[in-house]
Amino acid sequence: MATNRTFTMLKPDAVEKGHIGAILEKISASGFKIVAMKLTQLTKADAEEFYAIHSERPFYGDLVEYMTRGPIVAAILEKDNAVEDFRTLIGATNPEDAAEGTIRKLFATSISENAVHGSDSDDNAAIEGAFHFAGRDTF
Ligand code: RTP
Ligand code: MG
């Protein structure tokens, strides 16, 4: 399996609750290498663009409000089979459906406020990483 990259955000609910350290520990312990990382806050325009695919969904307005209400941690992660393995590590979108031990099962509040984002394809991982990081900030 090729070594490749995925993109993640620790979302505002996770940062507000003080879970940055615990989530990064779990990510590292699961074999992901952090190759870029920062604490930042999305503007409304950033969140609208990042989640543009959901613009017609009923939850879009709430999603943009949630994702902009406080700081997030953005990071690029490297591992064999990174995109799929990270989606497995974070668990289902709704924490009620997430497997035991997954990040969302442990740290998410609800289907809306679910602690962490993971890219859903190699193409989106590259697009999302480039949205947040300049080349010189990626190792
Ligand atoms: P993400 O993109 O953040 O990694 O999450 P995902 O693939 O598991 O889920 P997706 O369908 O892409 O939804 C994006 C985010 O929108 C919020 N959401 N709220 N209230 C709702 O029914 C609802 N559904 C989705 C969540 O924050 C979800 O992660
Ligand atoms: Mg998604």
Image (cartoon, rainbow, N blue to C red):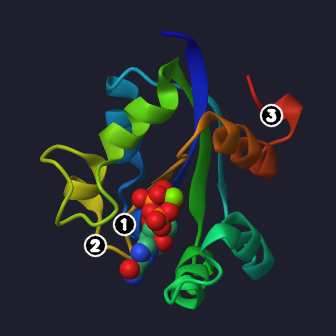
Say which mark, if any, is on residue 137: 3
Q: Secondary structure at mark 2?
A: loop
What residue is pinned by disc 1? 114
Image depth: mark 2 or mark 3 in front = 2
Q: Secondary structure at mark 3?
A: helix
What residue is pinned by disc 2? 109
Figure check: 71 above or below 91: below
Q: Position of residue 85 (x, y in %)?
A: 39, 30
Label 3 crowd bin: few (<14), some (14–19), many (20+), radius 10 Å: few
Label 1 crowd bin: few (<14), some (14–19), many (20+), radius 10 Å: many
Q: At 49% from the left edge and 86% from the top edge, which residue is drawn? A: 59
Q: Nearer the viewer, residue 60 or 102?
A: 60
In the rendered structure, the answer to whether residue 101 lies left or right of residue 44 reads left
Q: Nearer the viewer, residue 36 or 129?
A: 129
Q: At 61% from the left edge and 81% from the top edge, which residue is drawn? A: 64
Q: Are marks 2 and 3 in contact (CB under 8 Å)?
A: no
Figure check: 101 above or below 1: below
Amino acid tagged 3: Asp
Q: Position of residue 81 (x, y in %)?
A: 47, 22
Residue extending furthest toward the top: 1
Q: Secondary structure at mark 1?
A: loop
In the rendered structure, the answer to whether residue 36 lies left or right of residue 19 reads right
User: Image quarter for residue 105?
Assistant: bottom left
